[in-house]
Amino acid sequence: MAIWRETGASTSGEQMTDFLIIGGGIAGISAAARLSEYGKVIVLEAEPALGYHSSGRSAAMFEETYGSPTTIALNKLSRAFLENENGGVLSPRGLMLVGTQETKQEFAKDMVSMALQPITLEAALEKVPILDPEKITEVGYHADAWDIDTDLLMQNFARFTRKNGGTIESNQQIVQIKRSPNIWTVTSATGQEFSAKILINAAGAWADEVAKLAGIQPLGFTPLRRSIARIPAPNGLDVKDWPLIFGPGESWYAKPDAGKLLVSPAEEELSHPHDAWPEDLTLAKGIARFESVVTTTVTRLESSWAGLRTFAPDRSLVIGADDQYPTFFWLAGQGGYGIQSSPAASQLIADLITGKPSPFDKATMAALSPARFA
Ligand SMILES: Cc1cc2nc3c(=O)[nH]c(=O)nc-3n(C[C@H](O)[C@H](O)[C@H](O)COP(=O)(O)OP(=O)(O)OC[C@H]3O[C@@H](n4cnc5c(N)ncnc54)[C@H](O)[C@@H]3O)c2cc1C
């Protein structure tokens, strides 16, 4: 049964809609695209542009094996969309795990969890000639890891939303949320009001804050900061076909980006919802880990940034109706997988709202549902 159809007719008023989505990151905009097929959608984003926070700061990778079992289920189901829809947004990258004498245990674990194959040091050097054969003792690799054109993916979702009559409003920070029996009314800092039968919380690191505004019990999300530095291509080499290079136990990673290299310390620094920035010391630690397995040194950083990876207490996404208020939907806790899992996550939220059958089994649905925290 479609919940949104049970909630009664719209009242009059320009800003009345079927679905109000708070948050214009990948979560909000992908959900908007899906829901725009069923009714009128308005996306409300606090910042001047879509994807200003986490969604515009990611490493933009698709790695199917990455995340909890439910995340992997979402990744798998997202794959065909990312490969094909609107011409596709994936391009080949590959993933290489480089182990040293000190990282044997973590290396063995990652080889299994990421389904990597062992390759020789010679083969690894052919792919990444700066690897240090004196330090690296073992290497794993698979070709099945992909760059995601995140901008294009978001633009595609936004275009589809608008084509179906949906509206995307930037500079609309929601500061008040009221509920009458059948209608949610939200007010932005500019004083504008928007009403809808269904409210979707896709506010990323702010998901608990939005719930609190609505008088709903927060679920205990934790924003964890992660930073990235952009460095010049080592020795001026052509890096474009290098794989993502991964330190065992997710201790750092590096990947090519527009002729340069991105290096991340892969930190999970406990944070709070805010416009995140990197700390020099953290970046330096990541660079040092990278330098410890290569023959080159990093002489300068060209730029750097940080974003928040926001996790539910069990590190799985939260997708579904609030246990107490069934017209308030959570689409949150995307952690480090929000881009790659967005096609399936947005499909699932639309299926739940419109009462369509889901491709997921009951156990996966339960493990994604906010009701698991009740
Ligand atoms: C360094 C880094 C590397 C990553 N690498 C990858 C990767 O390789 N692959 C991958 O799939 N994922 C990756 N991620 C994770 C991914 O970026 C996130 O999971 C994803 O962007 C979360 O999307 P979101 O829409 O939930 O959050 P956001 O993009 O943060 O969007 C939430 C939006 O809600 C808005 N908002 C909040 N409160 C309000 C309010 N009251 N009113 C109006 N608007 C509001 C905010 O302004 C924000 O724009 C990475 C993240 C980081 C930081």
Image: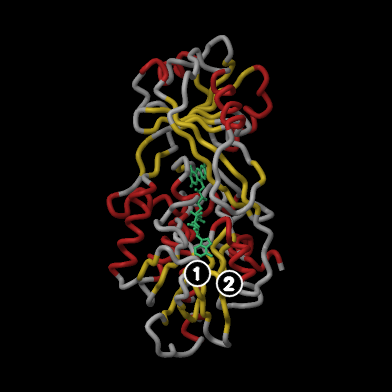
Q: Position of residue 165 (x, y in %)?
A: 31, 73
In this picture, is 347 found above or below 78? below
Residue at 51% across, 80% down: 185
> Quick one: 80 or 56, which is closer to the camera?
56
Mark 1 secondary-structure assignment:
loop
Disc number for residue 189 = 1
In this picture, is 135 found above or below 97? above
In this picture, is 86 found above or below 250? below
Residue at 49% across, 65% down: 173
Q: Position of residue 198 (x, y in %)?
A: 50, 77
Q: On the picture, is 90 further left or further right than 276?
A: left
Q: On the picture, is 212 further left or further right than 65?
A: right
Question: How many dots with numbers?
Answer: 2
Q: Position of residue 311 (x, y in %)?
A: 62, 52
Mark 2 secondary-structure assignment:
strand
Q: Amino acid at mark 1?
A: Ala
Residue at 54% across, 38% down: 227
Within 8 Å: ligand 1 and the Cβ of disc 2?
A: no
Residue at 58% across, 55% down: 205
Q: Position of residue 104 (x, y in %)?
A: 66, 23
Residue under label 2: 321
In this picture, is 248 found above or below 347? above
**Outermost residue toward the front?**
190
Q: Where is residue 217, by image quadrant?
A: bottom right
Crowding at dot 2, Cα within 10 Å, few <14 / some 14-19 / many 20+, comes out as: many
Within 8 Å: ligand 1 and the Cβ of disc 1?
A: no
What whole-number distance in Å separates the C-alpha atoms at marks 1 and 2?
Answer: 26 Å
Disc number for residue 260 = none
Q: Do callouts 1 and 2 mark residues in contact (Cβ within 8 Å)?
A: no
Crowding at dot 1, Cα within 10 Å, few <14 / some 14-19 / many 20+, comes out as: few
**Reading the chain from its start, which is encountered first: label 1 or label 2?**
1
> Quick one: 345 or 281, which is closer to the camera?
281
